[in-house]
Amino acid sequence: MMGKRIIMVVAALAAASAGDDLVAFVDGWCAKTGGSREPRLVVYNRIEKTGSTTLTELLRAFARQRVYVDGSVVNLGPAFWHDAVLTSPARRAQLVANVANALARAANETVVAIGHLDYGAAADLAPGDFGGEAIGRFNVFRSCDARTRSALVYHAADKANATACAATDDCSERQRATLAREASAQRDRALTARDGTVDVARALRSYDAVGLVEDLAGTLDVMHCAFPSLFTHRPRPGARGGPRMNACDQKARACAARGEAVSDRVRALCAAGDDAAVAAARALFGALLARIRAPGGRACCRTARPPSAAAPPEATRKRTKRVGSRDRLQAEKFMRTSLVAPSFAPA
């Protein structure tokens, strides 16, 4: 199946990532986003090893501060991952039912559906599946080198030496199956259409918001512009970074050499055009963020819906434990120390 995929990193990619074409796209994005209603349903087809656990916990932390709590963040479990909803009509129907139920319970709140869906499966979901509700989409990107190093740390039994393994052919060869799966994740989750083609420019521009792992604060700013009702806070002026992403934060010793090279065998596993795709995502993200943060940039952004008048009945709430994972604690600390309630946020 992988061999049949047509890798169409279009010849116009450089132009699509810079210059007049990028300026024109940002102009159009501002007009479209600032002039449209905020969607009530947002799909996040998360990519492995791009800080998605931390970002999910941040979204849950924001949800806990709104009238409706954790039920507005819907975790789509492994039964729906990858292209399962395209290959199984029953699973697709169940996914649609789960999300539709969350929308019905959530009153006026935004619902975020999160899972390791392939791009084609995520794009296959349509407003008609949810009573005409518009669907917003976002994703966060990271270089293949960094993702494969993080994958080695995450999966390795020898955590202390996992990063060094990425630079050693015999060690990385033993991890080939795991690395191959992780290395192709960015292409599969974020860029590959249902017919197997990869058109980077088109795929990136189909998202309402894109972000980068290395600038979580900027990523939240772009997301806040596209989906303001998700947020109760935004980054403080000049803020960058945020919680260090899960695997490397938990095993700091193993990730000390973040700039360490990876072996040629690891490099060969990276999807064709992955570096170019990340470069395009970085250019697009930088242009959007610069426009949003420029004077008058908030004219590009959607207006938040009024918050729900009252919380839904207790029986309809979906709660999580107050004492959570390291990622959850990091997310809540980040909210306390790096974010500030903005004047344009929901009340």
Image: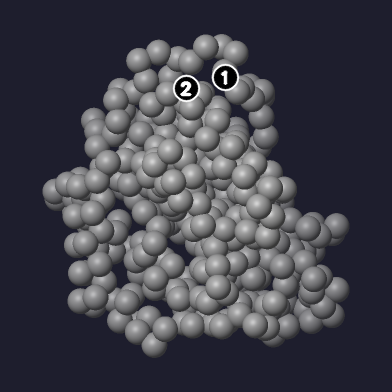
As drawn, the label of residue 317 is 1
Q: Residue furthest bottom?
A: 11
Asked whether 239 or 207 is in front, the reply is 207
Q: Quadrant of residue 189?
A: bottom right
On the image, the x and y values in percent for residue 257 come to 64, 65
**108 relative position to 7: left or right:** left
Circle 1 — which element? loop
Q: Residue at x 42, y 34 (%)?
A: 110
**Residue 210 at x, y = what percent?**
41, 57
Q: How many labels were placed on the picture?
A: 2
- Kind of element beneath mark 2: loop
Q: Nearer the viewer, residue 91 or 233?
A: 91
Q: Kindly indicate whether the residue at mark 1 contacts the one at mark 2 (C-beta within 8 angstroms).
A: yes
> Residue drawn at (23%, 30%), measured in percent from left and top?
343
Residue 35: image location, x then y, percent:
20, 47
| Residue closest to the eye, 260 or 137 | 137
Q: Amino acid at mark 1?
A: Arg
Q: Quadrant of residue 229?
A: top left
| Residue under the image location 51 percent in, 57 percent down | 124
What amino acid type should be assigned to the residue bearing mark 2? Tyr
Q: Residue at x 20, y 69 (%)?
A: 24
Residue 77 vertical position relative to residue 273 in the rendered view, above or below: above
Q: Is residue 130 left or right of residue 297?
A: right
Q: In the rendered image of this protein, does residue 4 appear above or below residue 60? A: below
Residue 68's disc number = 2
On screen, residue 165 above or below 224:
below
**Residue 57 seen in this snapshot:** no
Answer yes or no: is residue 151 visible: yes
Figure quadrant of the N terminus: bottom right
Who comes first in sequence, dot 2 or dot 1?
Answer: 2
Q: Residue furthest left?
A: 296
